[in-house]
Image (tube, rainbow, N blue to C red):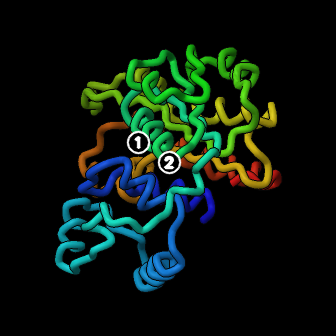
Amino acid sequence: MSSSVTAFVLSVFLVVGPINSFRTIIRNRVLRPSSSSCSSFSSSLKASPEFSIPDQPQRFANAKAASNERFLDIEKSLYDPSPLSNLRVAITGANRGIGLALATEATSFGAKVVALCRSSSPELDALNPAETITGVDVTDDEICSSLGDKVKGGPIDVLINNAGYFYEPEEKIGSMNFAEQMKMIDICALGPLRVTNCLAMKNLIREKTGKVIMITSQGGSVAWRTTQNPTGGDYGHHMSKSAANMMAVLLSQELKAKGIR
């Protein structure tokens, strides 16, 4: 499964509902599809001109009407997480939220977690990561440029760029916060690029088998804005996700020369 598809599937399952646990996302949807599920997935793509519709409530209603078990019963095991065993998995923002959930699941699969975060947390410490590197600010060029010198255990097998930020107050004409918009773009789009750039320059993403995953969202889709934002708004968030998606595509084009997906 290519990393672009892996990242896309992960981002899709982060936004479709209902989602019962991040264990489901990682174990059942991302790591290792069976040949039959891949065949079924490919068939569904060929049968429809689009992968999904932007209207989430309608998408869920359609799945219920069609008794789509793969969509509705997301606790059912379709994938085998065992390939993560003993791999070095680096996660930005691993101390809380989505990052902590990903670190917890990766640990349960036997991965060696490399936590990259501003500061640790009791929950992260309890996981006993292989490495915990604190003081990581993905908006700081100097800090990110020195990140490679702080990773001591060797190359990373899987890098998950998770650290993100969402400014919650409404953004409309007359209520714009341009500083917050730039902050979101800096963290969500340039942040993953800074981290990946540094680790790649230090040859710390394993060649031939390494993978880089971006946590983005359908919020970056230009085509879907007319459905989810029919009256506009949330400028910084959606702009940051579009920028992040573009960054991921360009990065994949460059890194594939080293066999990094």
Which quarter of the rendering shows the N terminus?
bottom right
Up-down relation of residue 16 to residue 235 (above or below): below
Whether residue 143 is visible: yes
Res. 112 image quadrant:
top right
Mark 1 / mark 2, whichever is N-terminal: 2
> Which label belongs to residue 109?
2
Q: What residue type is labelled 1?
A: His
Which mark is nearer the camera, 1 or 2? Answer: 2
Q: Mark 1 points at which residue?
A: 238
| Apparent side of residue 36 relative to residue 199 in the rendered image (left or right) | left
User: Does residue 139 show up?
Assistant: no
* Left or right, 66 with reference to 146: left
Taking depth in this image into account, of 222 and 110 the one nearest to the observer is: 110
Q: How dense is the environment of label 1, judged by Cα within 10 Å: few (below 14), some, or many (20 and up)?
A: many
Q: Position of residue 161 (x, y in %)?
A: 55, 38
Which residue is at the front of the view, 56 or 195?
195
Q: Residue at x 32, y 66 (%)?
A: 76
Residue at 41% in and 42% down: 238
Relative image position of residue 246 (x, y in whole percent): 59, 48
Helix, strand or loop under label 2: loop
**Callout 2 environment at 10 Å: few (<14), some (14 to 19), or many (20+)?**
many
For the residues labelled 1 and 2, say whether their Cβ atoms are less than 8 Å apart: no
Q: Nearer the viewer, residue 243 or 2?
A: 2
Residue found at x 80% / y 31%: 202
Q: Is residue 50 above or below residue 243?
A: below
Circle 2: residue type: Phe
Q: Where is residue 62 in the image (x, y as percent from the top left)?
A: 22, 73
